[in-house]
Amino acid sequence: MAERTKVTIPYLREKKAQGKPIVMLTAYDYPIATIEDEIGVDMILCGDSLGMTVYGFSGTNPVTMDLIVPHTAAVKRGAPHSFVIGDMPFLSYQASNERAVLNAGRFIQEAGADGVKMEGGEEMAERVRSIHNAGIAVMGHLGLTPQSVSALGGFKAQGRSVESALKLISDAKIIEEAGAFSILLEAIPSEIGQIITERAGIPIIGIGAGPYTDGQVLVVHDALGFFKGHKAKFVKQYCNLNEIVRKALQGYQQDLADRVYPAPEHCYGIDPEVLAEIKGSLK
C-alpha cells in the first residue's frame, strides 16, 4: 500500500471543492488512532467526550487540560498522517483570549496536535480570532454544544425554530470570518446543515446534521457499539464490540475455570539437564 501523505487544511478544502466526503472519527488512545490512520481517516478528534467514553463521567465538563492533552499526544503518535484535533475542554477558553491561546498552544506544543476545536458562536468569535492569530488552526462547534448542555435544556436537537436556525447560520459565518478552518455542526436539522454548508467557504463537518455537510464524524465508541443502552438518533453502529469483547473475555474466564489455559503451546520450556541440576541444588 502506498505511503499516506499528511492531511493538511488545503487538502481538506480541496475535498470540499471536489465534493468528496471528509472522513472524521474520534480517538482517545494510540491503538485506535493507529487503525484510523492506517485506513485513511482524514481527521481525528481527541474529543472531550473521553470524559464519558474513557473515564465514565456523566458529561464532558469534568474534563481538564491535564486530562485531555496526554490522550491527544497518544492519538498523534498513532496517527502521524491524519489531521489530529484536540478538543478544548470546559473553562479552558471561555474566560479570556489569553487563556484560550495559552491552552490551545498546549495542544500544539505538548501533544503535537494539528489544531484545536472549541464550542460557541458569535460570543466566542474573539476567542477563535485570537487562537487563529496565534498561528493555531481552530475548528468551531455549533448546534448541540455538550459543554453548554444545561443551558440548552438537555441533549436535544438545535435550530428547529426560525430564530435559532437563523442564529446558527449567522454564527457559522461569524466563526468562519473569525478564522476557523472548519466547523462541526451537531444535532441540527438536515436542511439547516445544508444551508450552512452551501454558504461556507470552509469544510463543514456534521454529526447529526444530515447528509449535505462536507464530512461526517462519529464517536468511535458509538460506531463500534462499545456500550449498551441509549444511543443518539444520528449514530450508526457498525459492529457490536460490547458483545464481541464480552464473549472473548468470557472465553478466557471459562478456559481458566476448565484449566485448559495456559496449554503447553503457551508455556516456556527448559533443558531437562538444566532442570535436573536446579532441582538437585534444592535438595
Image (cartoon, rainbow, N blue to C red):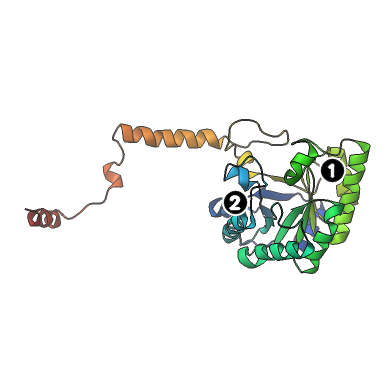
Mark 2 crowdedness (10 Å alpha carbons): few <14, some 14-19, many ≥20: many
Residue named by callout 1: 193
Give residue 28's mark. 2
Amino acid type of the residue tagged 1 in the rendering: Gly
Q: Residue at x 27, y 48 (%)?
A: 267
Where does residue 130 sit, x and y in percent of width and height? Answer: 80, 65
Q: Residue at x 80, y 51 (%)?
A: 120
Please state if 141 lies on the left or on the right of 177 as rendered.
Answer: left
Q: Nearer the viewer, residue 273 or 186?
A: 186
The answer to whether residue 112 of the structure is visible from this angle is yes
Q: Nearer the viewer, residue 236 or 149?
A: 149
Q: Earlier in the sequence, mark 1 or mark 2?
A: 2
The answer to whether residue 208 of the structure is visible from this angle is no
Separation of marks 1 and 2 at Cα, in angstroms: 27 Å
Disc 2 element: loop
User: As drawn, which residue projects farthest toward the front?
Assistant: 95
Please state if 135 lies on the left or on the right of 160 as rendered.
Answer: left
| In the rendered image, the vertical position of residue 159 relative to residue 65, given as above or below | above
| In the rendered image, the vertical position of residue 179 relative to residue 62, given as above or below | below
Q: Residue at x 64, y 61 (%)?
A: 81
Amino acid type of the residue tagged 2 in the rendering: Tyr
